[in-house]
Amino acid sequence: MLGDKPLEASSTDPSMFLARHIGLTPTDQDQCLAALGHFDLGEFIAAVVPADILEENASKASFPEGCSELEALEEIHRIAEMNKPRRSLIGLGYYGTATPAAIQRHVLENPGWYTAYTPYQAEISQGRLEALFNFQTLISELTGLPIANASLLDEATAAAEAMSLAFAVNKIATARRFLVDREVFPQTLAVLSTRAEPLGIVVEVIDPDFCEFDEDVFGVLLQLPGRTGKIWDPSECISRAHKVDALVAVAIDPLAQVLMVPVGELDVDIAIGSVQRLGIPMGFGGPHAAFFATREAYKRQIPGRLVGQSLDSDGKPALRLALQTREQHIRRDKATSNICTAQVLLAIISSFYAVHHGPNGLKEIALRVLSFRFQIERCLANLGYPLDSMVRFDTVEIHCKNAAQIHHLASLKGLNLRVLPIGSLPNQAKGFGITVDELTTEEEVIKLNQIFADALQKPTEPINKILPGLDKLLSEIPLRKGVWLQQPVFNRYQSETELVRYIYKLVSKDFSLIHGMIPLGSCTMKLNSAAELVPISWRNFSSIHPFAPSNQSEGYKKLVLDLETWLASLTGFAGVSLQPNAGSQGEFAGLLVIRAWHKSRGEGFRNVCLIPTSAHGTNPASAVMAGFRVVPVACDPFGNVDLQDLANKAETHSSQLAALMVTYPSTHGVFEPHIRQICELVHKHGAQVYLDGANLNAQVGLCRPGTYGADVCHLNLHKTFCIPHGGGGPGVGPIAVAAHLVPYLPGHPLVSCGGKEAIGAVSAAPFGSAGILPISWMYLRMMGVDGLRQASSIAMLSANYIAY
Amino acid sequence: MAFTFPDHFRFADNHEYAALDGSLVRVGISAFAVDQLGDIVFVDLPDVGASLIKGNSFGSVESVKAVEDMYAPISGEVVQRNDSVLSSPEELQNDPHGEGWLLLVKPADLAEMQDLMDSDLYSSKLSAN
């Protein structure tokens, strides 16, 4: 018998969540067992999972026992109460925004949208394909560039993808330098550096007005508006870059771009950014959708998914994923990028935000932001604060002696301002910054004015004496000329009735888990229970800025600690990082951790990565991104690793062997019996074992990668741990590592996280898509380790029954 | 399926061909490769003036289901490129040994042609698999 309780016990108790999660009744289970010739679940598991890796009491100590929905919601509510949602005017890529209630309810909270799979099967996906096509259209219209993809993971990794594209298309093989505007967000620079290093790219921070371009430079990234809020003309820099055939990428603010001349008209090659401020909550860093737009010429190098319009068998227009031959599942180690899961649900939300507001609504929001910023500037000027003279969009920065006092007074009024220098503590501040957003009101400006005056012990002037003239404001900015976003979809669903009908017209074209099962091999599609999803909409989770003072996110700290502890315990590892935003990012981070460990032992020359031919395409794509040379290992007709070929290849490359990437159970769903021997062999040659945890659903509670010899594994919370698939994102791809690798877990430039010798950030936000971590917390809390073991066992029983 | 290959063509393991044309060499991919690829939608070729190094990738051919790199069967300098294949990939599909040629190359060392298979050897290799 497995564990000290019969496996079947709690699954029949209807007050427990377990009974609602498991589909098979005890009678059904008996029927399956009988058909397969077993008398109970424990005996079946003992027959399926290799005896040398099956663990009796794995993980029990670290886990509370399973409970009901109500109990878990009460507990997570108490955790949420530990967060202090304040009004953050920090900016730096994260802004207050208002998600229209109809979109919250009918899209974000609608399982028809969030339980859908990636739209590979166009026939049953026309709804979300159209929503994504609208997203691509929005981005194309915003940027003035003809090709836009169906989302990337975040602005920082989108910048890294732009760097990779520029590198790939540059004709001069020796060009290795990538210039970066000193006004980019700090997290963008951090991720660029992490991604550049394994590829031998040198990242240089420059002032675009004074930088030199020579044949050594293959690309440049500019930020427009800059971090300080400045609006500037990049034309001169762009033409200098093009003279040496360097590509120009610009990180833009979508709300600023509503007003400003599209960067595509300035001869820019790539435009990237995040649509978070178009209706997606901050969520302590994510999930948010990033965008990537470029010229026609580079459409074959663009990363991520692309939705295209084609014709169906009746000759009528139909949508489908296009140009998939670039992607990792076909090109593998030659893919443009390792990205697979992106941020589809969030891209869809922001596309509906644009449908809801239309070009006029978006313009009004942008103008309001501009006017409020101007009012704040006037308040500051009137009180004698030193203002740099520049044209600005939403942000104003001030360097002054009484900055610490300003931050203190602001916090008393529930406001978080940007601390300058960035990364310092408020009580040591030498300046402050204010970024206006969609939620800014007159009251807020009055509050700020009071703070500015109080800090100088001066009286305030009433605001209405210093109203700006909109025309004068606009005259300073290079404006978009003519009309934009004229497509009917962005102009005809103005009433809520129309919008809701359009939303349902689309979602009713799609097949999702509300209709039937989606039995994918590589993307375990489980119940995304309502109780698990409830907390993500709570303000205490959704409205926290990732760079807010750390004492305002104690709830998130607890959530992160619980998840790290539970996931480490379930995998038999010593440490976990929740920063990667998808399995592909987890792979990349895990491989970098391995690389850092080899370097620390003076063996940085180890650069060969063995990968079975049956592996998921992201494996070789990630290995190449991590600077490794991929050597394929043969598989037998059942998809198992060919042990002889593995031994030969390990021997041949022994002195340079860095890692083996193995999926376990295999991508064919089989528990290879020799996994321990495989790990031992790899270790014998001085290398590390990376385990792809896509199929962890068969292992949870039964066996643990850390115990049978793996060194790192990634998890897919959007597979095994119930985060909904969303149509292709959001995802969360944490890595769990053995003790010797814990020091290298990824860090972040602005928030404390990661190991003592942390590798650079791999995502823009320190804890990745923190806003959806409550989902997996709820699942793990309600199931408890016995429930998890039961879920894994039932999943295997069902799979074997179907195969039989 | 039976393929015929022109007598003077020589073939590399990866199905590229090199055919002497005066003092230059015409490079393309064989009818077998084209058949394996399926509907060809895009061809990526180097510019005129680019150098080819034998064994190195010089471009790729993309079909509906796959993208394959093409490797230079000989070293040399590209003196002409079949631009009509770039705009109409069907030409490669329909006549890979004739109008669907890809590059005209000034060879660095004609002796490299000896390493390649002649049509008979290539044919028998294909039927063996």
Image: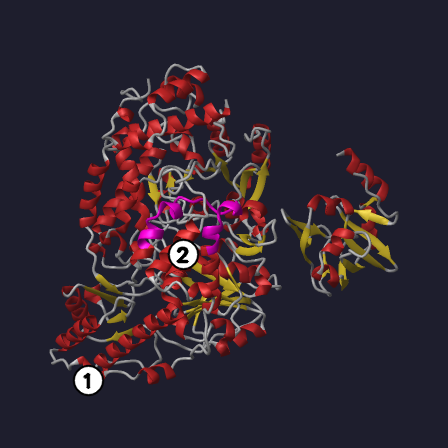
Instruction: Tell me, for residue A502, which label it has, or none.
Output: 2
Displayed quadrant of residue A348 = bottom left
Amino acid of disc 1: Lys
Q: Nearer the viewer, residue A373 or B117?
A: A373
Instruction: Tell me, for residue A695, which label it has, or none.
Output: none
Q: In the rendered view, would you say A468 is above or below A257?
A: below
**In what element is the residue under mark 2?**
helix
**Quick check: A64 left or right of A218?**
left
| Residue A129 is covered by the magenta coloring | yes
Instruction: Tell me, for residue A465, which label it has, or none.
Output: 1
Q: Nearer the viewer, residue B110 or A583?
A: A583
Q: Position of residue A59 (x, y in %)?
A: 30, 30
Marked residue chain, label 2: A
Q: Nearer the viewer, residue B118 or A145?
A: A145
Amino acid of disc 2: Tyr
**Quick check: A590 left or right of A554?**
right
Instruction: Give the residue at x 20% y 75%.
Output: A401
Q: Is residue A589 visible?
A: no
Q: Earlier in the sequence, mark 1 or mark 2?
A: 1
Of tags 1 and 2, the one toward the viewer is 2
Marked residue chain, label 1: A
Q: In the rendered view, would you say A218 is above or below A601?
A: below
Give the total number of marks visible in the rendering.
2
Q: In the rendered view, would you say B101 is above or below A786?
A: below
Q: Main secondary structure of the magenta part?
A: helix
Residue segment shown in magenta: A104-130
| Residue B119 is covered by the magenta coloring | no
Q: Position of residue A440 (x, y in %)?
A: 25, 69
Instruction: Give the residue at x 40% y 41%.
Output: A716
**In what element is the residue under mark 1?**
helix
Establish whether labels 1 and 2 are both on one chain: yes
Displayed quadrant of residue A355 = bottom left
